[in-house]
Amino acid sequence: TLRYFGGLVLVSQFSRDPQDFFEFQVAVGLIETLLFAGKARRQMPAPHRMSGLDWALLKPILPFAASLSLSAVLWIVLTQLDKVLLSSLLPLDQYGYFSLVALIAAGLMMLTNPLVQTLLPRLTVLMAEGRRDEMHALFLAANRLVCTCLFPLAALIALQAEPLIFAWTGDQAAARWSSPVLGWY
């Protein structure tokens, strides 16, 4: 919260320099990380002499954990690569328009988060209990629900991008630039 509201106060009251804003963001992020790390450390039980990793327990799940880690790394790379490349290729105003498109697309993706957070524990239990058919059926039902709800919304946003972006931003140039890109993003 300090990162967002503090950044707003910094920009509106003290400095409009982007470097000051980003330095503030880094400082607050570092402070938050240190505070959370300290709190997590205090919550951990005291280590015992015999505590340690039990490789016999970890070995069966290592391939699964490694595949999840690889998926997470690939997701981060693939979702950030376009931003890294385009930030050096586009002028600042066009990169801002692109960021608007990315924000809209991310907003659509975030609509699935409540469903994912609700279903993931259930899917995990079903998988752990070996009830793969039930897990598969639940996954497919959730997938159909998401597709039924989000595809029409995504199509509406893609097909009516220019008037929607103009209504949201009041900026005709942003709406004109973003409209053809949003349909593909």
Image: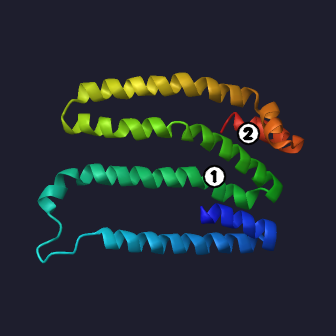
What residue is drawn where x is 55% and y is 37%? 111
Mark on residue 82?
1
Check disc 2 and report the residue beneath it.
181
Left or right of 152? Residue 61 is left
* Residue 20 point in image, percent of width and height: 73, 74
Q: Residue 74: x percent and y percent?
A: 47, 52
Q: In the rendered picture of this protein, how many numbered marks are placed on residues?
A: 2
Q: Residue at x 14, y 63 (%)?
A: 54
Q: Cβ–Cβ below 8 Å for labels 2 and 1?
A: no
Q: Amino acid at mark 2?
A: Val
Examine the rendering and report whether any part of residue 37 can be seen: yes
Q: Nearer the viewer, residue 157 or 169?
A: 169
Disc 1 residue crowd, few under 14, some 14–19, many 20+, Cα 10 Å = few
Residue at the far right: name it.
172
Q: Is residue 73 left or right of residue 85?
A: left
- Helix, strand or loop at mark 1: helix
Q: Quadrant of the N terminus?
A: bottom right
Which quadrant of the rendered structure holds the C terminus? Answer: top right
Q: Residues within 10 Å of mark 2 (few under 14, many from 20)?
A: some
Q: Which amino acid lies under the numbered mark 1 shown in the image of this protein?
A: Asp
Q: Quadrant of residue 131?
A: top left
The residue closer to the viewer here, 153 or 69, is: 153
- Is the residue 175 above or below the residue 33 in the image? above
Element at label 2: helix
Question: How is the model colour-coded?
Answer: rainbow
